[in-house]
Amino acid sequence: MLCGVLFFTMAGCSLVAGSVQTPELTSCSDSKDVDISDVTISDAKIGEKMYLNFTLKVSRQLDSDPKLELTIIKENEEEVPCFGDVGSCTYKLCDGETDLEMALGQLWDNKCPVPEITAPASLGLTLNPIVEFAIGKAPTTVTLRLKVTDGGQSVGCESFKLDIEKADS
């Protein structure tokens, strides 16, 4: 749910064997009704398909127009704007219309209410070279902030850094 968007752009990532990152998650909300943990990111390289694996925990039913607010912050602290449905955008978690929104809601068949659930999840996204126009020339590091709201109120928020490697020459 939170994580489909994470691939686009994520202080404390450590690069491990090859191109696997295990970012340090920082809470940005007092609420923990929605939480992600065990995050690993592989192949975060321009021109490659990046994979995000994590555990999603929703500890109470979400039934008041739940949304994911993704904020992507570049190294220079500037926020990446929303381009179509990519970048610092807000995504519906139920009755999604775009491919990304439908992917975010796949664990609950894209229908509200979002049930209480703890489940492993995996998402993938190709880092097209054009993404460098939004986030800056790779190699670079971006910070991702993933805030989930229900009825306009925060029910969980995590942030983390993502190191993006340059394309192979």
Image (cartoon, helix red, strand yellow):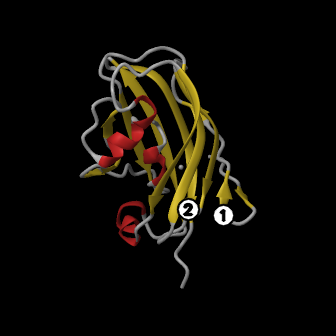
Q: At x 49% / y 54%, what residue is drawn?
A: 124
Farthest residue toward the right? 17
In which image quadrant can residue 102 be found? top left
Label 2 element class: loop
Residue 108 placement (x, y as % from top left): 42, 29
Is residue 121 positioned above or below 134 on the image? above
> 65 and 167: which one is in front?
65
Would you say residue 9 is visible in this rendering? no
Label 1 element class: loop
Name the amino acid, label 1. Answer: Ser
Name the amino acid, label 2. Answer: Ala
Residue 44 numbered mark, or none? 2
In which image quadrant can residue 125 be found? bottom left
Q: At x 27% / y 45%, what residue is drawn?
A: 98
Is residue 96 positioned above or below 18 on the image? above
Q: At x 54% / y 17%, what residue is drawn?
A: 59
Q: Mark 1 or mark 2, which has the lower sequence index?
A: 1
Residue 141 numbered mark, or none? none
Residue 17 placement (x, y as % from top left): 75, 63
Q: Quadrant of the N terminus?
A: top left
Are there few (<14), some (14-19), or many (20+) residues within 10 Å of tag 2? many
In the picture of the structure, the residue carrying the numbered disc 1 is 19
Are there few (<14), some (14-19), or many (20+) residues within 10 Å of tag 1? some
Q: CA distance from mark 1 to mark 2?
A: 7 Å
Residue 71 placement (x, y as % from top left): 40, 42
- Is 32 placed left or right of 115 in the picture? right
Would you say residue 46 is visible in this rendering? yes
Residue 26 placement (x, y as % from top left): 60, 35
- Tell me if label 1 and label 2 are in contact, CB under 8 Å: yes
